[in-house]
Image (tube, rainbow, N blue to C red):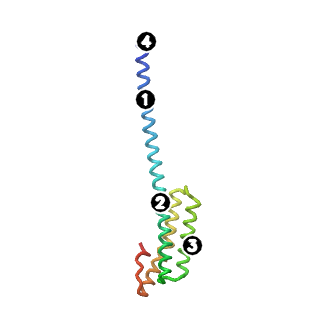
Amino acid sequence: SRGRCFFSAREKRHQNDEGVERLVLEAKQNKSNDLQYRRQIQERIKLEAEGQRLMRVLKQETQAGRIGDGQGKTAVEELVLNTLEWLRRNPTAAYEDLLRRSERLHEVADPIMRQMAYEAGEHGHDLPELVD
């Protein structure tokens, strides 16, 4: 009876050790998943905020009469609206997709916004908020 209790205690300790190892392994896997999810959410928030910022700047500067309704402004507005709509339709978009959308937004919007800021500067206006 005594040997049996000893074996059971050893067996329980072994099971506990295996359980702890399993929990540690799961925690490591979850940490990796959590980091990926965090990165995805951060990129999503950043993309949405940038789109909203661009729309706000375009609206403010148009209302102030500093920029007109030119083709560049329309292109940026369309791209931003499409990007924001895509975000609404794809709430679980992968990080890589979000990154591609962000790069595309900057690829199109940045030169146009710089040009509008430059043109506004030629006319005595200062639009530093148009360019990061």
Q: Residues at badges 1 and 4 in contact (C-beta under 8 Å)?
A: no
- Left or right: 131 in relation to 83: left
Task: Identify the residue position indicated by label 4 in the image.
Answer: 1
Q: Earlier in the sequence, mark 3 or mark 4?
A: 4
Q: Residue at x 40, y 81 (%)?
A: 126
Q: Earlier in the sequence, mark 4 or mark 2?
A: 4
Q: Secondary structure at mark 2?
A: helix
Q: Residues at badges 4 and 2 in contact (C-beta under 8 Å)?
A: no
Q: Amino acid at mark 4?
A: Ser
Task: Identify the residue position indicated by label 1 in the image.
Answer: 16
How far apart marks 1 and 4 lie (CA) works out to: 22 Å
Screen quadrant of the N terminus = top left
Task: Where is residue 13? Give x, y as percent.
Answer: 41, 26
Query: Tag 1: Cα neighbours inside 10 Å, few (<14), some, or many (≥20)?
Result: few
Q: Amino acid at mark 3?
A: Glu
Task: Where is residue 11? Give x, y as percent.
Answer: 44, 23
Q: Name above or below for residue 78 compared with residue 96.
A: below
Q: Earlier in the sequence, mark 2 or mark 1?
A: 1
Screen quadrant of the C terminus = bottom left
Q: Name above or below for residue 8 compared with residue 17.
A: above
Q: Secondary structure at mark 3?
A: helix
Q: Earlier in the sequence, mark 1 or mark 4?
A: 4
- Mark number for residue 78? 3
- Mark number for residue 84? none
- Report the residue that reaches farthest toward the bottom: 123
Q: Amino acid at mark 1?
A: Asn
